[in-house]
Image: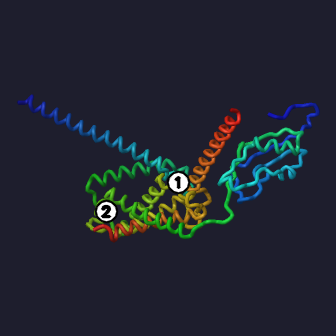
Amino acid sequence: MLGSSGGDGLKKVLYIKLLNRRRVVENSIVCLGDVAKIRGNGINVNQLDEIIIHQIQKSDGSHVIIDILDIVPLIEEVEPEMSIEIVGVTMCILEIIPLKKNENKLFFWFVWILLFVGSSLAIIYFHEDVSMQKVQQRIHYMITGNYSRKPLLFQVPYSLGLGIGMVLFFNHWFKKRLNEEPSPLEVEMFQYQRSLDEFMMINENKRSDEDDLKHRT
Amino acid sequence: MKIKEVMKMILSIARDVLTAFVGFSGGLAVGTGFVAFLSVIGIIPRLTQITKTISKLRAFERSVLLGSLFGCWISLRDTVLYLPNIFLVIIGGISGIFIGMLAAALTEVLNVFPILAKRVGIQKKIVYLLMAIALGKVFGSLFHWIYFVP
């Protein structure tokens, strides 16, 4: 698109592909090689990879968005005689990881217990809501022919099966994976992350548009 | 006199037809709703993915159909099978697995997790939170059946 079929036909072409998102450590310096893949003939790619794009500061918050249009002038400073072909996305999200990890063990266990107690209560609510006790008493009668007030022979395997079913669905038993395919949870996490990224990109666009308007008036 | 009897018969036939019609349309609504629920929840695709039996999807479809018809029949009639107790354990376990998958598949669970993991900032430990839910369900269920019910 930018390449012109000019005279000698040996014009240098640079192909640049921005990465979708990248995690960087606080206070680090981000180079072009960190956020993009570069290919091209007759070009010193290593030199381009070293171009400094951004220095992470406190004011950046948790995310920085790098726009391809901010990168192009920096490349042209180093290699003015060349056309740039952009492949893929036009923005890269830098997620900033704080140096000191503030992972709180206590917090984690609180959430763990919260989920444990909450899901036990939820399953009791569910059982009561669908009158499962009555149904299972009836199933006990149907299968064996005798009535049981507490059909535990049915209910205990049922309870264990409940756990097995959940593990099967999520494809995880603690750290062990049951097979290689991504689990629904991972897909869901990915989709959530992508929606967040999209939201950030669009909001970033809006913000820079507003800045432009302010500059003009 | 005869005309009155004929009228009575016609009326009773009409009533039966109406009852059957109401029953049939109710069944139609529940049946479509049930299938829609199963498709939305996505247990069957997940099972075929785990067991790599995507080609047998038709058979699973039929299995669900026959299963619901069977459940319909035995819950509306007073069928008693007089089977030994071991069948209780097998059927109990199987129905537990199904309900477990249902509980896991409910989109609330899936939508809550990514947000929770982000907020808490423990994406690596999300598996443990998953286990908290699964074990919590097992515990809650056992607690319910053994201690909670009078």
**Is residue B45 shown above or below B96?**
above
- In the displayed structure image, the side of residue B27 where residue B63 appears, left or right: right
- In the displayed structure image, the side of residue A118 where residue A216 appears, left or right: right
Q: Quadrant of residue A85?
A: top right
| Residue identified by numbered label 1 | B46
Foreground mark, 2 or 1, reads 2
The percent coordinates of residue B132 (x first, y second) are 49, 66
Q: Which mark is residue A123?
A: none
The answer to whether tags 2 and 1 share a subunit is: no
Outermost right residue = A8
Q: Amino acid at mark 2?
A: Gln
Q: B84 or A107: nearer the eye? A: A107
Chain ID for label 2? A
Quick one: SS at disc 1?
helix
Outermost top residue = B3
| Residue identified by numbered label 2 | A133
Q: Amino acid at mark 1?
A: Arg
Q: A177 or A119: nearer the eye? A: A119
Chain ID for label 1? B
Residue occupying the point 89% across, 49% down: A44
Crowd rating for badge 1 (residues with CA inside 10 Å; few <14, some 14–19, many 20+): many
Q: Could one spot residue B90 in this view of the protein?
A: no
Q: In which quadrant is the N terminus of chain B drawn?
A: top left
**Is residue B89 shown above or below B31?**
below
Q: In which quadrant is the C terminus of chain B drawn?
A: bottom left
